[in-house]
Image (spheres, grey):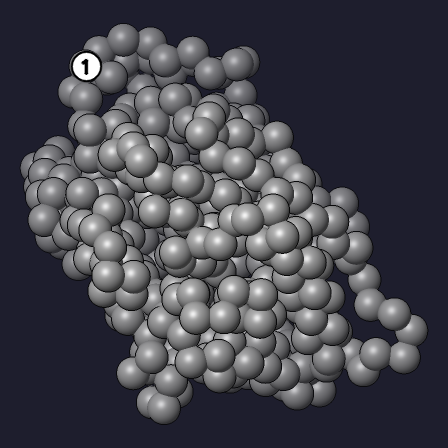
Amino acid sequence: MKFLFIHQNFPAQYQHLILHLLERGGHDIVFISEANENAIPGVRRVLYRHEPGAPEGVHPAAIDLDRAMRRAEQVAAAAENLRKLGFVPDIVIGHHGWGELLNIPDVFPGVPVLGYYEFYYWSQGQDVSFDPEFPSDASQRPRIRAMNTINHLAYALGQAGQTPTQWQLGLYPDWMRPGIELLTEGARLDLCRPDPAARQQPLPLGELTVEPGDKLITYVARNLEPYRGVHTMIRALPALMRARPDVKVVMVGGDNVSYGARCPNGTWRQHFLKEIAGKYDPARLLMPGQVSYGTYLRLLQRSDAHVYLTYPFVASWSLREALASGCAVIGADVESVREFVTHGRNGLITPCLDPGALADTVLEVLENRKLSDKLRAGARRYAEKHLDMKLHLAAYAKRIQQLTGQKI
């Protein structure tokens, strides 16, 4: 089969599917995206260049739509070049969030499109104004509502849609849900797995070494930002370190912003660390930025308590992988996390914005070996039943066959 994938950040969430297709063999795979350093042998990349910003005169509430239509135009031009070169895909698979798929049916009429619907924006009741520390002015509601214009235009294409969780599906209006299928995402259980030996030897991490007798608290996010509860995590550090001198903390994540506003002065990491200056031991905290996948997996395997915080927003892949790795997960008390974590069974739930409650919950895990063992075993059992990548790939393959009439 001929596959065309489209996502501004290659390979995004399609990495596992692409590797599966390559392993099966016999497929021609092309990926349209913006430029980056990632590469997968066997995948032909077609790049487009998107200029950020909006021209003068665009209404503030329409900036996202303007950018989306420009992306749609650029991606369609790249797809048109492919068509002229003789490449007509059997299916197009991509993400609707940036508008890149909006003009594709014009280039490849009759070719099925399977689009990823990640998030439907609500001006109240979800992530917006969830955190009273960072309120959203009522004047922003028109802009937030207008962000769904891309979702609506995508839906009007009349093509197939998918989303990975019940919570995400439930965000969409009733009239949209029939066109969006639940295709759950998983984890590589062969890679993300418990390793009891990880606690029996030192783990060197730059300037920090985690000794076998240390208690390691881990936190992972793409970027250290309030949307992923970095302020709650950092504010919990003094109490955690004061209670247990054997605690060491590794917080993985960059200093950019994936979601929400930028820090007005420096980075969010600097901002919140300054707030607790003199109240914690910097020698027991490591913030290494973004790390290699191997180091990340080793951290999960060694972790004594893994913290996953988020606003009511899309759950990260790291939550799935932490459960698969048998971590004792302490997750935010929001619906997107509770879909994965059942309190007392495969993790513990704590308020996202309460540092004191977070510290108490983490300490409960560190000090109660029986509870810790129960949560770890429960996490792995949950992953084996619900998060196996093989289930995800099988569901994808079935949907592709339904749309194309071809078996992969």
Which residue reaches farthest top? 201
The percent position of residue 149, horizontal first and vertical second, equals 59, 81
Asked if residue 196 can be seen in this view, the reply is: yes
**Circle 1 — which element?**
helix
The percent position of residue 59, horizontal first and vertical second, equals 81, 82
Which residue is the site of mark 1? Answer: 197
Asked where in the image residue 335 lies, by quadrant, the reply is bottom left
Viewer-nearest residue: 302 or 236: 302
The percent position of residue 321, horizontal first and vertical second, equals 29, 40
The percent position of residue 317, horizontal first and vertical second, equals 37, 47
Who's the residue at 79% across and 55% down the image? 51
**Which amino acid is tagged 1?**
Ala
Vertical order, 337 against 390 (above or below): below
Asked where in the image residue 18 lies, by quadrant, the reply is top left
Looking at the image, residue 165 sits to the left or right of residue 296; the answer is: left
Viewer-nearest residue: 295 or 21: 21
Looking at the image, residue 393 sits to the left or right of residue 368; the answer is: right
